[in-house]
Image (tube, grey):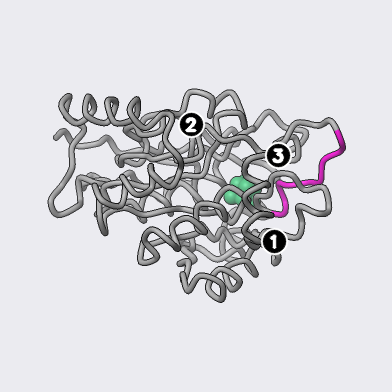
């Protein structure tokens, strides 16, 4: 394994750790050898037409307590939580609590605990919102949202990935061009984990049908025309006919926080102010 270069972000106060990342830090570690990648590809192809419950069952059997799930409490995540509650309720589930989430989003954590007995861990960034805005002379989401997402989401997920082998995401292929290529099972180069997307083949309609069929709790903001919900400063309600993710970072070129784009490990964005 080669040492990773020191990567400074805008303010020069963070450096990419040289130590093992993601599954490299697990016991036993997991490395993306050609054999592993080939095996994952074969399983992904085999599970392409499987039900999400079958895919999750495979993940739990294969990775055990080294399988984890990240959720932003979106409708897809709530559907997976409902499935996991029946397949493996002890799975470690976490939320990237940026400090900018809607209160309605955070209230879902309590509803999940009450309904399923699953205590979703709220993982926070290094600095509180107050500290962060003080360091940067104001809210960075206004001037450099890529840096803000990097500091408050990607770095936190990188830490959560340490010692795990695999994580589940709730993305659907029809959500965006970036997500359209997502395999059911693949290697996540960014977080150094196996990434499992049990709902990759599902549609929004299937997700909402499941929510209503099983009375799964969901964010009440969806009833107020918020189709996709992230942090409150970067989310707006959308009008009929607008794209599902049109309300995210509206008015900017940014479409993704960076968690689900297929890139090399988290790299700090260039700070245009330097
Ligand atoms: Fe910051 Fe907005 Fe990204 Fe949340 S979505 S981390 S507020 S830039």
Frontmost of labels 3 and 1 is 1
Of residues 161 and 100, the one nearer the viewer is 161
Residue lying at 43% horizontally and 61% vertically, measured from the top left: 86
**Residue 203, placed above or below residue 231:** above
Prevailing secondary structure of the magenta residues: loop
Residue, disc 3: 249
**Residue 219, placed above or below residue 28:** below
Q: Tell me which numbered mark, 2 or 1, is placed earlier along the sequence.
A: 1
Residue, disc 2: 261
Residue, disc 1: 102
Specify whether tag 3 is near ligand 1 (CB below 8 Å): yes
- Does the residue at mark 2 contact the one at mark 1 (Cβ under 8 Å)? no
Task: Please report the bounds of the magenta region as a residue range.
Answer: 232-240
Q: Are there few (<14), some (14-19), or many (20+) residues within 10 Å of tag 2?
A: some
Indicate the position of residue 96 as horizontal and vertical percent values.
51, 57
Residue lying at 36% horizontally and 61% vertically, measured from the top left: 88
Question: Magenta segment: does it hold 234?
Answer: yes
Separation (CA) of disc 3 from disc 1 = 15 Å
């Amino acid at each position: 394994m080669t040492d990773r270069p020191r990567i400074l972000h805008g303010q020069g106060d963070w450096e990419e750790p040289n130590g093992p990342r993601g599954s490299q830090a697990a016991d036993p570690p997991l490395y993306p050898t050609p054999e592993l990648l080939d095996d994952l590809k074969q399983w992904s192809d085999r599970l392409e037409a499987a039900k999400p419950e079958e895919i999750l069952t495979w993940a739990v059997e294969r990775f055990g307590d080294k399988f984890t799930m990240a959720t932003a409490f979106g409708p897809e995540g709530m559907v997976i939580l409902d499935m996991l509650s029946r397949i493996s309720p002890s799975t470690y589930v976490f939320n990237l609590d940026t400090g900018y989430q809607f209160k309605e989003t955070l209230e879902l954590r309590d509803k999940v605990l009450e309904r399923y007995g699953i205590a979703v861990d709220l993982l926070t960034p290094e600095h509180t919102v107050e500290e962060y805005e003080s360091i940067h002379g104001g809210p960075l989401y206004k001037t450099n949202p890529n840096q803000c997402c990097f500091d408050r989401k990607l770095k936190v997920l990188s830490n959560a990935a340490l010692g795990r082998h695999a994580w589940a995401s709730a993305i659907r292929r029809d959500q965006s061009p970036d997500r359209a290529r997502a395999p059911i099972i693949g290697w996540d180069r960014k977080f150094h984990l196996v990434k499992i997307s049990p709902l990759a083949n599902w549609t929004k309609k299937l997700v909402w049908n499941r929510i209503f069929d099983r009375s799964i709790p969901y964010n009440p903001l969806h009833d107020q025309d918020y189709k996709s919900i992230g942090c409150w400063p970067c989310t707006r309600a959308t009008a009929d006919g607008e794209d599902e993710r049109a309300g995210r970072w509206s008015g900017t070129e940014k479409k993704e926080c960076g968690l689900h784009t297929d890139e090399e490990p988290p790299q700090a964005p260039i700070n245009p102010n330097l």
